[in-house]
Image (cartoon, grey):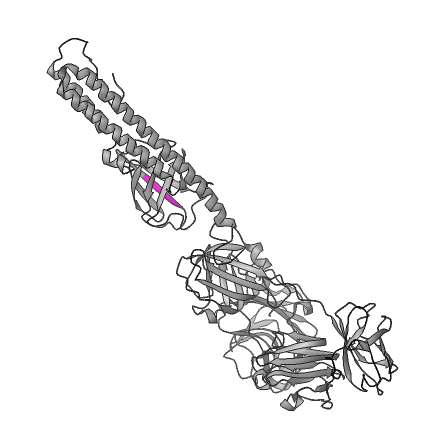
Amino acid sequence: MTNGFFNHDNPEARRTLARAESINATFQSVAEGFDKLPAEAEMKQGRVNRATVTGGPTAYVATLPYAPASYVDGLRFSFKVPSTNTGACTINVNGPSGALGIKSIKRFNGADPAPNDLTTGAIADVEYDGSVFVIVGAHGASETNAAASATAAAASQSAAAASASAAAGSASASASSASAAAASQSAAAGSATAAAGSASSAAGSATSAADSATAADQYASAAGGAAPAARMNWDTGTSVADPGAGKVRVNSATVASITAIHISESDAAAANLSAVFTSWSASSNPVKGRLRISHRLNLTKWIEADVTAAVDNGSWWTISVAAPTGPGGFAAADVVAVGFSRAGDKGVTSTYWGGTAGGTANALTATTGSNLSSLTAGQILGVKTGAAANSSATTLAVDSVPATAIRKNGSATVGGDLPANSDLWFQYDGTYLRLLGGSGSSPVSFPSTGQKTTTYTVTAADAGKLIPCSGSWTLSLPSAASAGNGFAVAIKNNGVGSISIAPNGSDTIDSALSGVLALNGSVILIGDGTKWTSICGVGFSASGATWSPTAKSTTATLSNGNLTVAFATSSQWRTTRAGSSIPSGKYYWEVRCDSGSGSNLTVGIVDSTFSNYETQPASPAFYRSSGDKQQNTGGTTAYGSAWTSGDVIGVAVDVVGGSIWFRKNGVWQASGDPAAGANAAYTGLTGTLYPACGTFDNAVYTARFKATDLGYSIPSGFSTIP
């Protein structure tokens, strides 16, 4: 009788005397059979299929208590992870005569493990599928059944040992005792099988749990409220660079100083998020939405900020942010969720200025220039009354809209309600035009300061007044802090040209660095102690980048909302730069040469070290009208086509990559291709950079910083300067 555990080739016949050698041989076979079974302690402790594993994080080596002779489909064991994996990894199992060979470890779906799938100290369970080892989960509560069955198997083994002992006590019953021992041994094997079955059930439950956990991990909301969220790993670097696949970093270790977030285009599970990040800048609002980074397991660690732009750098993105808040506290390799809530688009214009009213004092007419054919509830209309006040009930007809009755505090107007020569505002309620102003108050009006025709700075005495303007010049505002909360001033452009409105220092108007009031435009500006907000604006636009009113040659005159610069110079280099620097990322703008000739017209960039605007603009990179390029104060180098008055020069700058390209009338020079990052005019640019232009003789340039002003398409991956 042979079964691999117990060999008995010559069983004794019944009712015969047995020889001592035969009895001893039988017991020896029984002992050898038990030696092939797991030890009682191993079975009681549930360590029959528990391997000892070393190595990592990309290559592990496993040693089982009972070394397998080869890899077979279904070979399964658990182990304590010695080192957290960093991604794809392998395992090599030791056999009786050495290692059986390196095999890949895969997720249940065939994908390589993501970083942290196998965590130091965790218990992992793997099964060979004939090709690779598949992670089937971590051991959980369902292992209790397997441990119980293993205990039963150990008990049966003890019973087998007892039977063998009894056999030793009676030589004549040796065959029967040996048979009993074999039977008990068989029972032990059966219990061991049951243990394996329970273990398999436990693994099956763990597999299902792992599947559900994986799905939840990829698609469910993350802890801390970042939903919907991308799973990332935290990188502690702060430089402007690719954080690495599946990682995210910020540009400052201090939360309050964060202005940019650098994030991999693929998440921790290798899913591409390009379309997601593109949507983050889709809103037409200056603030695109609110971003939140939260620790997936620790709710006390998080950062929030407003998103203002999103720039594609290839395999990673730069997300420009403002107003950061939160405790932060992330450590290297922390698992985090990055979520975004989109802001709505900017609303359409609902305020119109009708200029000086026509008609009569009691039947006003006005023309807005917008060709209104109907009114919508909530719209605001403004007019300036004529030389006479109304004497009774009044109507207003705007564009082709029929005359609409005006109401004050819900009642028809009476004589004197609409003073002569006054700027008045009305809001349409669906039936009537309601005179703006509280119950019992006078109509909204601003006493005039008198016509302004040249550069002017608003003073404290101008609060609550109308400043009528004429010409093309800059009206400067006081600092919002000194003006105080509630300071209001009305501005009207009733002459020719456009009026540039410049806040003080770093103050803003509607989150922009400046504003432009077009011909016949009007606006009311209100300060809150920190910034300026426009209301009732007609022909007013808050703008971002313009030529700087201060960082320019003394011979340069600005107009057109500081977008046009005219140099009055003869045989002397002069320079002007933009008021705001180029943010981190990829940006494009254009400069049209309105007038000028010769070989010394220049368009390009300067850095923050350039401060003498009465000198040549040659630092750090320029495209000259001669067709040459020039860097720093060195000589020129042949580059592209010559250009002159009427030509449009396009400039593309990759601030992160330190490269610049130039185009003439839509054609990139010297085979340049900024979208592909190829054939740049210059590389290695560093520092804080500004758009700039200059000339050796008289010249006029107009900058096109806004997308709506551009004459040619923006290269893929680039944006306009905010």
Q: Is residue 423 magenta?
A: no
Q: Looking at the image, which residue is at 33% across and 37% down?
A: 101
Nearer the observer, 170 or 705? 170
| Quadrant of the drawing holding the C terminus | bottom right
Magenta-colored segment: predominant secondary structure? strand
Q: Where in the figure is residue 53, as x and y percent of width and height?
A: 30, 43
The quarter of the displayed image where residue 286 is located: bottom right
Q: Is residue 88 magenta?
A: yes
Highlighted magenta segment, given as a residue range: 87-92
User: Which residue in the rendered view is the most extreme toward the left?
Assistant: 20
Is residue 169 shown above or below 212? above
| Residue 711 appears left or right of 326 | right
Q: Where in the figure is residue 65, as x and y percent of width and height?
A: 26, 36
| Residue 652 appears left or right of 428 | left
For residue 644, say whether it is visible.
Answer: no
| Residue 375 appears left or right of 106 | right
Nearer the observer, 545 or 652? 545
Q: Where in the figure is residue 697, as x and y percent of width and height?
A: 64, 83
Nearer the observer, 638 or 715? 715
Is residue 352 shown above or below 199? below
Q: Looking at the image, which residue is at 49% across and 48% down?
A: 216
The quarter of the displayed image where residue 161 is located: top left
| Quadrant of the drawing holding the N terminus | top left
For residue 351, say whether it is visible.
Answer: yes
Q: Looking at the image, which residue is at 46% across and 42% down?
A: 211
| Residue 46 appears left or right of 307 | left
Is residue 235 shown above or below 688? above
Nearer the observer, 553 or 141? 141
